[in-house]
Image (cartoon, rainbow, N blue to C red):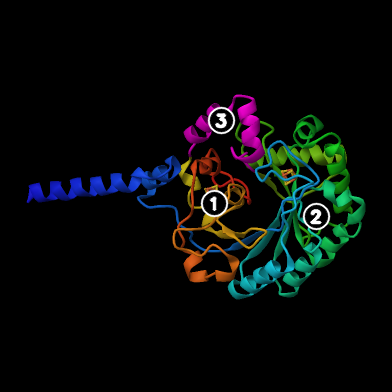
Amino acid sequence: MRRACKDVTERRKVIRQSQWKNMNDFESKVQEITRSCLKACDIGTLQVNVGFRCNHQCTHCHIQATPERTEMMDWATMQHVLDTARKIQPKLIDITGGAPELNPLLQRFVRSLRENRHNVQVRTNLTVLLQPTMETMMNFYRDTGVKLVASFPCYTKKNVDPVRGDGVFEKSIEALNSLNAIGYGSDPSLKLDLVYNPAGAFLPPEQSSLESDYRKELEANFGIVFNNLITLTNMPIGRFLQLLRQQNQYREYDRLLRESFNPKTLDGLMCRHQVEVGWDGTLYDCDFNLALQLPISCGAPSHITDFSLATHSSRRIVTGNHCFGCTAGYGSSCGGALAG
Ligand code: SF4
Ligand code: SF4
């Protein structure tokens, strides 16, 4: 009897080892802790990347956006998103880019989503709102009740301009002042969150204490108010990976992310609670997998035209070693830190 039990244990060990053979290090880590692969739990958020064009070329940009990028979501794909959203009724439609405002169909898309009573948030880089062609955009956001999530990597010029470009800090302050003037950050129906990401190869500090610093500094120096601060970890992909390699910091940063693995972040990983639609309708687990061109797979359809709530809400997540960026320290997601 004892011999039989030992055989079963041995067999399970061999099966597990063979299952783990083809896994990346992140997947092995998840298996080691949960005895399972990473799977989606629900689809609370439908994230939509409407294009890679941006007025900036930030050094940490995972999507490698530039003013010259031409990838842009068309109306046919937006209609598929509208149909899917109508069917699955997600809690949130989260629109990202590039700079979403540079897609000329953005206002039509947002208006249609709001007519269908969806909660909509747009990720804005702030400065794009000051461009000559964007005079109507802030009022459009206000009138349609869109929540704004604004990237603003620090409350000091010395940490913003080297990452985003000369003069970006002042322009961001100007845009924030204008948004405050129309009610963003103070009117309960006009939420304004800010996004911090580190200026280099280190992890974000604890979110709530940094939020207090932001609040104090922005209010005292510029009279700016906002709702919440979201902290994001820089992913070692895209332009930030190039920078790490140029500065010979990749190995060190990769080690930092792996050594800071925090199992408490696993439940909240954004890929487990969302699906992302890329500009051409391809489906991804998250914006980082979109940047790496790793569509949803493992038996779940990879295009919006074949979306299935039952299949996608329990799909296996496509992972890679970049995923250690989401589980390091306090954790990182489009909604901020994952573990206190
Ligand atoms: S990080 Fe944001 S603002 Fe900067 S280039 Fe990328 S998309 Fe544009
Ligand atoms: S990078 Fe994407 S797939 Fe990987 S853990 Fe983060 S959210 Fe999930």
Q: Nearer the viewer, mark 2 or mark 3?
A: 2
| Callout 1 secondary element | loop
- Kindly indicate whether the residue at mark 2 contacts the one at mark 1 (C-beta within 8 angstroms): no
Q: CA distance from mark 1 to mark 2?
A: 25 Å
Q: Which mark is residue 102?
A: 2
Image spot of residue 260 (x, y percent): 50, 35
Residue at the spot 10% in from the left edge and 50% down from the top edge: 4
Mark 1: amino acid: Leu
| Callout 2 secondary element | helix
Q: Looking at the figure, which quarter contains the C terminus? A: top right
The verdict on residue 32 being magenta is no
Q: Write down the residue under mark 1.
A: 294
Image spot of residue 279 (x, y percent): 67, 59
Question: Of 202 and 12, which appears nearest the observer?
Answer: 12
Residue 10 position (above or below residue 105)? above
> Start and end of the magenta stretch?
232-261
Circle nearer the N terminus (1, 3)? 3
- Whether ligand 1 has any atom under 8 Å from the Cβ at mark 2 is answered as no
Quadrant of the image occupied by residue 165: top right
Mark 3: amino acid: Tyr
Residue at the spot 64% in from the left edge and 25% down from the top edge: 247
Q: Write down the residue under mark 3.
A: 253
